[in-house]
Image (tube, rainbow, N blue to C red):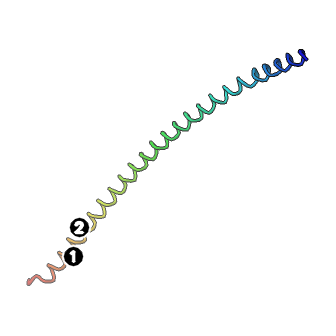
Amino acid sequence: MRILGKSRGLILAMCLAFLAPSFLLAQDSSKQDLKNAGHETKEATKDTGRATKHAAKKTGHAVKKGTNKAAEKTEEGARKIKNKTDPN
C-alpha cells in the first residue's frame, strides 16, 4: 500500500512538471497575442487617419474647383444678360 501511495505522488509530481512549462508558455503567448493585436490596431488607426486626411484634401480641392467653375459660369451669364440689355 505504501508503494502505491508513493507512486501516485511521483506520477502526480511528474504530471505537474510536464504541465507547468506548457501553461506558462500559453500565458506568454496570449500576452504577446494581445500586444500584437494592440500594435495592429494602432497601425490600422494610423492608416485610417491618413486615408481620412487624403480624402479631405481631395474633397477640398474638388469643392474649390466646383466653386470657381460656378463663379465663372455666373459671371458669363451676367455678361450675356448685360450684352442683351445694353442699349448700344
**Residue 78, percent across and down?**
18, 75
Give the residue displayed 69% in from the left and 28% down from the top.
23
Q: Secondary structure at mark 2?
A: helix
Give the residue displayed 48% in from the left and 39% down from the top.
42
- The answer to whether residue 33 is above or below residue 56 is above
Give the residue displayed 27% in from the left and 64% down from the top.
67
Q: Quadrant of residue 16?
A: top right
- The answer to whether residue 48 is above or below residue 84 is above
Q: Amino acid at mark 1?
A: Gly
Task: Give the CA distance from mark 1 to mark 2.
Answer: 10 Å
**Residue 13, percent across and down?**
78, 19
Side (left or right) of 35 relative to 18: left
**Residue 63, percent across and down?**
31, 61
- The answer to whether residue 75 is above or below residue 17 is below
* Residue labelled with disc 1: 77
Q: Nearer the viewer, residue 33 or 53?
A: 33
Side (left or right) of 71 relative to 11: left
Give the residue displayed 55% in from the left and 38% down from the top.
37
Q: Nearer the viewer, residue 86 or 24?
A: 24
* Residue labelled with disc 2: 71
